[in-house]
Amino acid sequence: MRRRVALSIVAGIFLSGFLNATPQKTGEVLSAWAPGGLDIHHINTGKGECVFCLLPDGTSLLIDAGATTRSKPRVTDPRPDGSRTPGEWISRYIDHMLAWNPEKVLDYAVVTHFHDDHMGDITDESKWSKTGKYKLAGITEVGDTFRFKKVIDRGWPDYDYPEPLESRMMKNYRDFLADGQTRNGLHVERFQPGRHDQIVLVHCPADYRNFEIRNIAANGEIWTGVGSNTRKYIPPVHELSPGDRPSENMCSIAFRLSYGAFDYFNGGDIVGVPDEWAPEWQDIETPVAQAVGPVDVNEINHHGYLDSENAYFLGALRPRVHILQVWSPSHPTPRTLRRLLSTRLYPGPRDIFATNMMEANQVVIGDNLEKLKSRQGHVLVRVEPGGASYWIVILDDSTESFRINAMYGPYESR
């Protein structure tokens, strides 16, 4: 009942502007989400990848919470600054967006794969949790602020594919899960490709029957696009030489979020441009693209690194909007950006929005970097109730003002 009351409070604020086609202006503070809307926040801390979604009925979904410990000049400066950790900044951002619901609960947290820029690495200096059972970094730090109801990752419960995952970071993450199960009734599941009922609306699902999250891939198992059928794309590990075993990125979770005519793709760090000497199956993007089909918004795979966004993938998805989460001077590489911009791969306009471009990117990439619509800030995809159209909103990441630096749209969903 408390959740329904909270939803009704913010509904008028949001819908009065959105449905009357009076978008906000640059310099204004972002208005609150409200029922029927879909917000997809790409949060920039300069230290990894993080996506926070408010789904049409108020269901909350966190996808990754990165906190890399890699040092300059290989990474960007922290945003807004270095006074707090990435996990703290992410938690404060989410807390602001959930001001209408002070319960400090997130319905879902998804960890696409086990790399520090997506889940957070720990150091000797990392703080301990409130219970003293695990250290705080990235996903565990957000989980120390908010109670997660369900965590979904690619490895539960064994964490042994393609080999046992026994790093200090992974042991800390598993301690976090165990503590949550003991204290808070945390539910943990392995992501299951092919399903469309693993991540669902939990508050008012009957009100939004045109909403779906389709599980596409994980651990090299990929949805065929037919029913819930999947196929094992990566050969059995015991048949592979050590040099050909799948990387962590190849095992990433991938999903498609659909709301009416609107489609959004997130593939974590899946790759599609293998080394010349690598086996063909190391191209994960192509079979994923065959299942996904056209989308409106593509969260760029593997930060636009040289092994991502292959020609077939781009031609199949044909995104109107690309979103690039950046923390390194190799994000994106010049050749990948050329593919993203090429109208020979698919016709029509496309806009690219990046969270945190470094000066080094300008030196390496050159003039093509000027073709990006935005190169700094949190990137919000704000979808109209029903999914017929959407806006791209660039939020100031230098402070916690949540002020709008730019707005683009409306884009018509396809």
Image (cartoon, grey):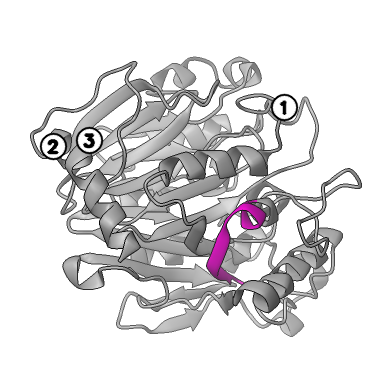
Q: Which residue is mark 3?
A: 348
Q: Closest to the observer: 143 or 392?
A: 143
Mark identifier at residue 16: 2
Measured along the vertical axis of the image, is residue 72 above or below residue 282? above
Q: Considering only order in the chain, which callout, 2 or 3, is on the residue closer to the N terminus?
A: 2
Q: Residue at x 25, y 71 (%)?
A: 205
Q: Which residue is mark 1?
A: 83
Q: Considering only order in the chain, which callout, 1 or 3, is on the residue closer to the N terminus?
A: 1
| Residue 118, horizontal then vertical, whole percent | 63, 51
Left or right: where does residue 262 sit relative to residue 90? left
Query: SS for tag 2?
Result: helix
Query: SS for tag 1?
Result: loop
Q: CB under 8 Å between callouts 3 and 2?
A: no
Q: Residue at x 78, y 64 (%)?
A: 170
Q: Closest to the observer: 98 or 315?
A: 98
What separation in Å lies between label 3 and label 1 (alpha carbons)?
A: 43 Å
Looking at the rendered image, the quarter that the N terminus falls into is bottom left
Q: Considering only order in the chain, which callout, 2 or 1, is on the residue closer to the N terminus?
A: 2
Residue count near mark 3 (Cα–Cα under 10 Å), binned few <14, some 14–19, many ≥20: few
Does residue 304 belong to the magenta stretch?
Answer: no
How many numbered markers are drawn? 3
Q: Report the span colored magenta.
A: 142-154
Q: CB under 8 Å between callouts 3 and 1?
A: no
Amino acid tagged 1: Ser
Residue 294 in sight in this render = no
Q: Residue at x 43, y 69 (%)?
A: 216
